[in-house]
Image (cartoon, rainbow, N blue to C red):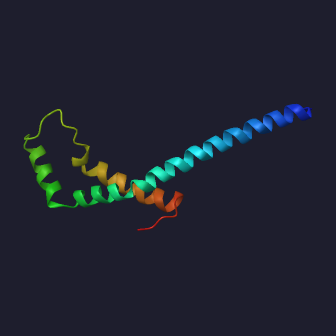
Amino acid sequence: MMTSIERITKMEAILEQATAAMDELEQKIENLYKMQDDIKKLEAYYSSEEWKRDFALDEKGKLPKELKRGVLSEDAIYDLLERNKELMATVCNYKD
């Protein structure tokens, strides 16, 4: 059987860990919320003629090989937008 001191010590540790985890989660949710304007810009780019032109340039090998081009991957942007929508609806109770 646990003594009062052991029990209090154990519960205090749980309290501290849970508080830290919740603080961290709240900060990450706030960061995601603040990213929404930029994510809308990414979504607009993805459905624009500019994206199509950039994609065509990449397909023709006209872009530098060292250029990061994840935004030209149709799946990467689509998956991110869907994931964002799900997270915002679930975690933040946010709707467009």
In the rendering, at what x and y percent does residue 69 appear? 22, 42
Residue 94 sits above or below residue 81 on the image: below
Q: Quadrant of residue 37?
A: bottom left
Using residue 50 as the reference point, say whether residue 35 is left or right of it: right
The residue sitting at 13% across, 50% down in the picture is 54
Q: How far across and how far down the image is residue 1, in percent?
A: 92, 32
Looking at the image, residue 26 sits to the left or right of residue 75; the answer is: right
Relative to 94, is 51 above or below?
above
Q: Residue at x 88, y 32 (%)?
A: 5
The reply, left or right, for residue 6 in relation to residue 78 is right
Quadrant including the C terminus: bottom left
Task: Where is residue 67? Give x, y as percent.
Answer: 18, 37
- Residue found 34% across the figure and 56% down from its top: 39
Q: Residue at x 42, y 60 (%)?
A: 85
Q: Residue furthest bottom?
A: 96
Give residue 14's quadrant in the image: top right
Total numbered circles: 0
x and y percentages locating residue 64 in the rendered image = 12, 36
Query: From the viewer's perspective, is residue 72 above or below residue 44?
Result: above
Question: Dividing the picture into quarters, in which one does residue 60 lie?
Answer: top left
Instruction: Depth check: give the residue in front, 78 or 27.
Output: 27
